[in-house]
């Protein structure tokens, strides 16, 4: 799709939004139900596409992709009428007699740029929030997940006319053309490098943005933790989708006194979850493409690998790997890993661990395993991060009751549930002043009596 075709899509969406067709709440509900029905109809096709792109099993595809989108739709259908209502607020006595209220309104024409690692979920989850809020939307899936992008395009074309929701496929040229257009809101999920470019382009039109980025999310294991359960939940979160998860535990930071028993439990858990030969496990996925496969191999130091790390270049698969004796100066600690490699570092005191994390860019997620509430409270209060879990990994993003988003270098803004509705809305503050009374105090000429009354009203 060329730049002129993209420009026409944006113009048609702006014209369609101007008709007010997206504003009635019942129409928004109808749109969400159509999307819900289409997803259910194409579920097996979605599974096949995600399998082709990332090697995910049907179970994992539903758990981490389709099911999350369907859950967000169901949540919005239950709450949209409440979220879209005008909310009356207190009116100061100085404004007597008037009615003050907040009116949620859609931004207008929204651009959603989604990544390849959860190609279905991260394209349609924000779309659900955008439609619930009353916007039109252009969805740009990643070129790295072409099979899923094709299914997304099919589903959205089946549900909506392009002037309401359009899918733009392609690569860098299409991304560039889209970012040169004037949107009313941009929602981007991806790397910090691309996020900076999105923000730079958005600034040309003063377009507000949400940036869902990434970073090196730490997992602290304190000495009072249940090591067996810690290993089980850590292995699940780290190697889900072959580690290609923005909130995966990027590295393990454990108390030096429990290092050996913890590593033993991690070894056992990798075997228990993936088998003696993970590369023969049909439910274990693959790296998205050869570029990222080669990058990941370059981060593995064979001298520090204590578990796994075997690879299949022909299938772009790397077995779950654990690297011990890692320091912050190692190559694997120089960038977000985004793959099935777990570096293990140790600390002597919890204050040292906190200082090490705070000395680096703010992570998207943080995980703390501990048997002491005081330790959990100290870590979650002292470290800056987007979201996270105590004694688990990953699951904080799977609820519509809490917003999900980054902080500082890991992003800005959030979505899911009410917060997602608010992200794709702007709130108009309105005072409806009645006409049957007009207090003369504010008008010139000013008098000392009027000043006394104003001072009384405004204290």
Image (cartoon, helix red, strand yellow):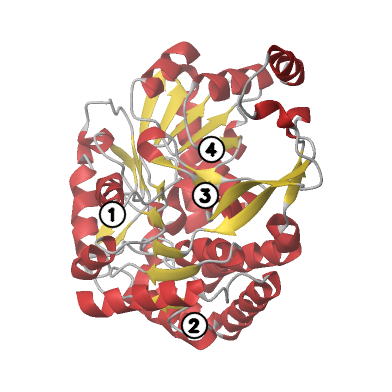
Say which of marks 1 and 4 sits in front. 4
Calculate the distance from the C-alpha at mark 2 to the C-alpha at mark 3: 31 Å
Q: Residue furthest front?
A: 445
> Residue at left 33%, top 32%?
324
Tell me if I can see residue 313 in this picture. no
Callout 2–callout 3 Cβ contact below 8 Å: no
Query: Which residue position holds label 3?
Result: 236
Say which of marks 4 and 2 sits in front. 2
Query: Which residue position holds label 1?
Result: 310
Q: Is residue 452 above or below residue 146?
A: above
Please give the label number shown on residue 204: none
Query: What is the quadrant of residue 196 in the picture?
Result: top left
Calculate the distance from the C-alpha at mark 1 to the C-alpha at mark 4: 32 Å
Q: Position of residue 200 (x, y in %)?
A: 25, 47
- Pointer 3 or 4: first along the chain: 3
Please give the label number shown on residue 387: 4
Q: Secondary structure at mark 1?
A: loop
Say which of marks 2 and 3 sits in front. 2
Query: Which residue position holds label 2?
Result: 155
Crowdedness near tag 2: few (<14), some (14–19) or many (≥20) residues, C-alpha within 10 Å? many
Crowdedness near tag 3: few (<14), some (14–19) or many (≥20) residues, C-alpha within 10 Å? many
Calculate the distance from the C-alpha at mark 4 to the C-alpha at mark 2: 31 Å
Calculate the distance from the C-alpha at mark 3 to the C-alpha at mark 4: 18 Å
Callout 3–callout 4 Cβ contact below 8 Å: no
Callout 4–callout 2 Cβ contact below 8 Å: no
Q: Secondary structure at mark 3?
A: helix
């Amino acid at each position: 799709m060329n730049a002129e075709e993209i420009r026409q899509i944006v113009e048609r969406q702006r014209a369609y939004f101007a008709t007010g067709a997206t504003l009635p709440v019942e129409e928004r509900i109808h749109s969400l139900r159509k999307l819900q029905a289409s997803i259910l109809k194409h579920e097996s096709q979605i599974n096949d596409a995600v399998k082709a792109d990332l090697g995910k099993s049907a179970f994992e595809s539903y758990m981490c992709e389709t099911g999350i989108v369907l859950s967000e739709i169901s949540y919005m259908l239950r709450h949209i009428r409440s979220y879209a209502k005008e909310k009356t607020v207190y009116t100061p006595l100085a404004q007597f007699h008037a009615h003050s209220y907040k009116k949620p309104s859609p931004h207008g024409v929204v651009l959603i740029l989604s990544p390849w690692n959860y190609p279905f979920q991260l394209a349609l989850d924000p779309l659900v929030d955008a439609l619930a809020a009353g916007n039109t939307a252009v969805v740009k899936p990643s070129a790295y997940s072409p099979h899923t992008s094709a299914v997304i395009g099919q589903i959205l074309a089946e549900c909506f006319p392009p002037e309401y929701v359009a899918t733009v496929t392609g690569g860098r040229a299409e991304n560039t053309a889209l970012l040169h257009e004037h949107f009313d809101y941009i929602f981007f999920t991806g790397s910090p490098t691309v996020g900076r470019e999105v923000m730079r382009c958005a600034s040309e039109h003063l377009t507000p943005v949400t940036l869902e980025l990434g970073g090196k999310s730490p997992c602290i294991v304190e000495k009072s933790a249940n090591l067996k359960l810690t290993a089980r939940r850590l292995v699940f979160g780290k190697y889900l989708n072959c580690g290609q998860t923005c909130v995966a535990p990027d590295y393990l930071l454990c108390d030096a006194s429990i290092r050996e028993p913890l590593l033993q439990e991690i070894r056992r858990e990798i075997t228990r979850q993936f088998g003696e030969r993970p590369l023969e496990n049909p439910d274990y996925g693959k790296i998205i493409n050869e570029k990222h496969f080669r990058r990941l191999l370059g981060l593995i130091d064979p001298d520090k690998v204590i578990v796994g790390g075997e690879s299949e270049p022909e299938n772009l698969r790397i077995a779950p790997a654990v690297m011990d004796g890692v320091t912050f100066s190692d190559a694997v600690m120089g960038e977000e890993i985004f793959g099935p490699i777990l570096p293990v570092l140790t600390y002597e005191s919890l204050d040292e661990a906190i200082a090490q994390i705070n000395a680096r860019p703010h992570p998207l997620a943080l995980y703390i395993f501990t048997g002491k509430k005081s330790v959990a409270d100290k870590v979650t209060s002292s470290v800056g991060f987007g979201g996270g879990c105590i004694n688990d990994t990953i699951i904080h993003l799977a609820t519509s009751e809490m917003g999900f988003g980054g902080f500082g270098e890991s992003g800005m803004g959030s979505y899911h549930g009410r917060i997602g509705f608010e992200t794709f809305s702007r709130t108009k503050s309105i005072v409806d002043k009645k006409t049957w009374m007009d207090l003369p105090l504010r008008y010139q000429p000013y008098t000392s009596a009027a000043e006394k009354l104003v001072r009384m009203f405004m204290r």
